[in-house]
Image (cartoon, helix red, strand yellow):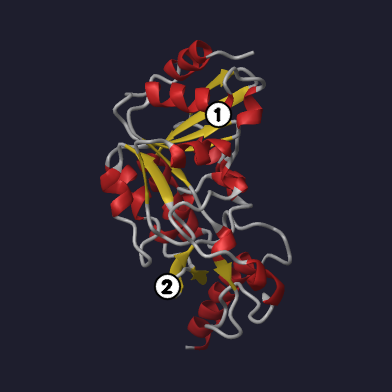
Amino acid sequence: MLSYRDLITGFKKLEIDQNKPVILHASLSSFGEVRGGADTLLGATLASFHSLMSPTFTYKSMIIPETGPGNNGLEYGSGHNLNKMAEFYTQDMPADRLMGSLAEKVRLHPQAQRSTHPILSFSGIHLSEAIELQSLEEPLAPIQWLLDHQGYVLLMGVDHTVNTSIHLAEQKAGRKSFIRWALTPGAIYECPGFPGCSDGFNQATDHFAKITIMTKIGEATIKAIPLQEMVEILVPIIQSEPFSLLCEKPNCPRCQAIRNQYNYQTNEQTDA
């Protein structure tokens, strides 16, 4: 069984300046048995990194309208049953289970601050400036703040399919984003800048080989990737290979929408 001391010792092996901010993605179960569970993992992480952030997304607030803009990676009118189950977003809405138990522990920490985005919120500890930058129009602004402050992505027992920061590289490369709609007690909000599918993000693994710091804690592989270098590597790749990092699922609406947009633009240029 892993102890608090074991976790601290493992994080030290990463040799990252503890004053550098980190964005966390973690699977508690990947570590094996941890004495004290997610509370111990968060405590050890906070003892190792002064400021940290986690996505605390809430997809259950999303609704699907009857109509909307074209090529939006969404089948309008298909959400009758899902819309009935949608919940009003509030600041105390738990993070989706897909975010992992550690993300929810970050949200509940007494020193945590959560952004107000009704779908793509982030919760941070000692990162008020980053959290407050987020808006409906700029959902990835907290990640940009981390990049500007030499932050790291910390993957704990998970792979790049949950690496939200790769979406910032897609944005900087000019890749298409989407519009989604969220239910709140006051109104239905249109949320632009919604990112694409991340199922193909493991294609980036080899590109990060030289910048990834790795160690093992229990059964979990821990990876730390500097955000600035990660984005600098990916932007030219996405720009030169427009379908890079997209998934191969034939029924993925967002990846297909990105392909559709590129093919349409290419045909327009050819016709011109």
**Element at label 1:** helix
Q: Which residue is mark 1?
A: 38
Total marks shown come to: 2
The N terminus, quarter of image: top right
**Element at label 2:** loop
Tell me, for residue 128, which label it has, or none: none
Residue found at x 60% / y 58%: 246
Q: Position of residue 104 (x, y in %)?
A: 52, 41
Residue found at x 61% / y 46%: 97
Pointer 1 and pointer 2: residues touching (CB < 8 Å)? no
Please state which of residues 213 and 181 is positioned toward the viewer in this rendering. 181
Mark yes or no: residue 203 visible: no
> Looking at this rendering, what residue extends furthest in the bottom direction?
272
Q: CA distance from mark 1 to mark 2?
A: 34 Å
> Based on the displayed image, in which of its 4 quarters is residue 168 positioned?
bottom left
Say which amino acid is labelled 1. Answer: Ala
Residue found at x 51% / y 22%: 40
Q: Position of residue 109 (x, y in %)?
A: 42, 36
Tell me, for residue 186, which label it has, or none: 2
- Judge the density around disc 1: few (<14), some (14-19), many (≥20) Cα neighbours within 10 Å: many
- Judge the density around disc 2: few (<14), some (14-19), many (≥20) Cα neighbours within 10 Å: few
In the rendered view, does 118 fall on the left or right side of 196? left
Residue found at x 53% / y 49%: 94
Say which amino acid is labelled 2. Answer: Gly
Please state which of residues 228 and 74 is positioned toward the viewer in this rendering. 74
